[in-house]
Image (cartoon, helix red, strand yellow):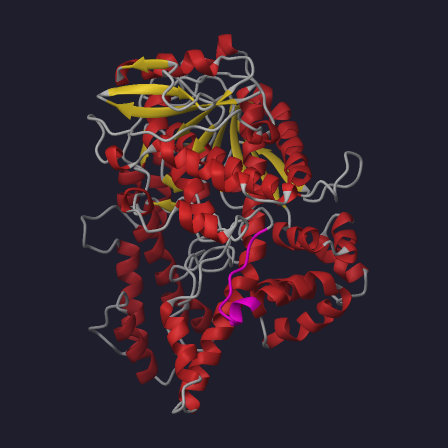
Amino acid sequence: MVRDILLVERDASVHLVDGAAPAGAAPLVVVAPAGLPRAVAELEAEPDGVRWVWDSAFRRYPGLIAAGVRVARCWDLRLTRAILRASTVPPPALVHDAWPAHDPAWDAWDGDIGTAAATDPTLDGGDAATLFDLVGEAAGTAQSGSTGGAGSTGTAARDTLAEHHRQREVLDAVADPARRHRLRLLLAAESSGALAAVEIRYDGLPFDAELHGATLTRLLGPRTRPGVRPATLERLAGEIRAALDAPRLNPDSAPHLLRELRRNGLDVRSTSKWELQGLDHPVVAPLLEYKGLARLASANGWHWMDTWVGAGRFRSDYVPSGVVTGRWSSRGGGALSLPKIIRSAVVADPGWTFVVADAAQLEPRILAAMAGDGALLAAGARGDLYQGLVDAGAVDTREHAKVGMLGALYGATSGTSGLLVPRLARAYPRALGLVDDAARTGERGGVVTTWLGRSSPPASPEWREAQAAASGAGAGAEEERRARSRARDWGRFTRNFVVQGTAAEWALAWMAGVRQALRAMVPADTADTADTAHDGDRAPGRSPHLAFFLHDELVVHTPQEHADEVAAAVEHAAAQASRLLFPHLTTATGPPLVPLEVLETASYAGSVAEPDVADAVGAVDDGAEVDGVAPASAPS
């Protein structure tokens, strides 16, 4: 049985406390901070395995990796606390009693993401484990106690023992065993994701800075000093000014540019490329090219490379649950929006390759599973879900199937998508009924919850004020219009929350399974061999390792001789994730709930998982996400 071991700071030392021990029991080990890696490595080697309970993986784990110690499991109290406090699954009264007020020490703390730099990594091979093992019940319940102590800023206010006790108490109070198990699965997957985020940043994504620099020079011209446009941008700026007869125009100023476009008779509401590309005017071609290249220069230019690329690796800080639905975000470097032209510099080390896996049509498949919609599940079982909708007679073309399904997920009411959604609702009433119910809940200001138990944030005070103003005695047409608009916006958010959030849960379970498989793949006696592919490289020896994660896509960097084994492990982990979330729908012999597109490639530019809306420079326009997902923040 996996046992919990709590990491507690006290009196300038670190106490490792057995989670099953009664209150006041002596710790298993007391060490100085410098001795922690050795103590963790010794306990990590226990045959049944351990789960490290600590305040934040981002605070605790980088130092262990730097000392050559990697762990299989953890319980990240900061992340799990956020889920439990907001979830509608546990009894609300008990949640309120456990956390009666906002505690800045926990709730306003980012877990020290990005504050610990890592050096000299090695990889601990470890033993294989499924995510189900990660969820395994730990014996007993830890008792509360003070964690205060010197040597760690701010930890005195974060009582690890007491917080762990509260969380166990809240979990144990969930009466329905199935819902309790699902919630435990979510907390385990979230914590495993925190370990993966630290490891991915530490190991880095192979990146050829010389190749990217040559691409920048080819497209933009030679590097210039800060504040000076590269030659290509300066030339295009001149063409834009000439086309608009505006010699003083600054094309980087959206208000100035919009004013000049309108002065030239162009009826536009913004400078977005989606509006510009439909216009018939000489300014369109140079302006669109300028916008794409300007974004390349600002988002992924020389300064970006100086900041985020070093020793042959791109490293960004990944933020688990950086999006309210549970999706990851990144802090700095734009890791989750790398356009194709950047991916061309992501090249595997000599003798290595990438295994790139993309979960095909993940959100519609997750919706079918959540709703138990047999007809939609059958369409997906044929392989291409969108073509399955056509074959079933729900729509006439694959493109219409895709547009209509996205409209259903994101609440489209107009255009082609709005016309197709009713047809899908007739063909797949259970699936469409699920998201319609979620939308109606949101329109009433209610909270919705994902399959495993992550709940949406409540409607904002501004939202409630708008609804109250519309129902007041003196309310007019404008107040009613504003209230209806706010209600619809929030309904679209909750509609997508349940599906995108559950898809994020599936992806976390998938990544956890891949991570555990990779840990077991290379024998321990070869895992610590230093990799000399790059001077100063911090890659984990000759072990395959996760190098990138983007919502429904995983990239593993692996020695070529292990590529087939890695590809099989990635496929197995996807099937395992489906069985963990939806055991009543999946079998070992049936078609996969979520099929993968898997590719072995030396260059990430050749991956199968390119964004739908763009394929080169300018893939991201005005900050929009490349795959058309819902905004990272909820509407007010």
Q: Nearer the viewer, residue 28 or 334?
A: 28
Q: Is residue 36 above or below residue 110?
A: above
Residue 607 visible somewhere in the drawing: no
Q: Residue furthest front?
A: 23
Q: Residue furthest top?
A: 525
Q: Quadrant of the N terminus?
A: top right
- For the image, the number of numbered tags is 0
Q: Is residue 413 above or below residue 238?
A: below
> Which residue: 53% across, 21% down?
519
What percent of the width, then of the height, locates residue 253?
26, 68
> Which residue: 28% across, 25% down?
9
What percent of the width, then of the height, locates residue 243?
32, 75
What percent of the width, then of the height, locates residue 70?
43, 21
Whether residue 443 appears in magenta in the rendering, the answer is: yes
Which portion, as a residue range, is magenta? 441-450
Q: Is 392 on the left-hand or right-hand side of 514? A: right
Residue 26 visible somewhere in the drawing: yes
Whether residue 445 appears in magenta in the rendering, the answer is: yes
What percent of the width, then of the height, locates residue 45?
49, 12
Q: Nearer the viewer, residue 214 or 73?
A: 73
- Most frequent secondary structure within the magenta stretch: loop
> Which residue: 41% across, 79% down?
468
Q: Quadrant of the C terminus?
A: bottom left
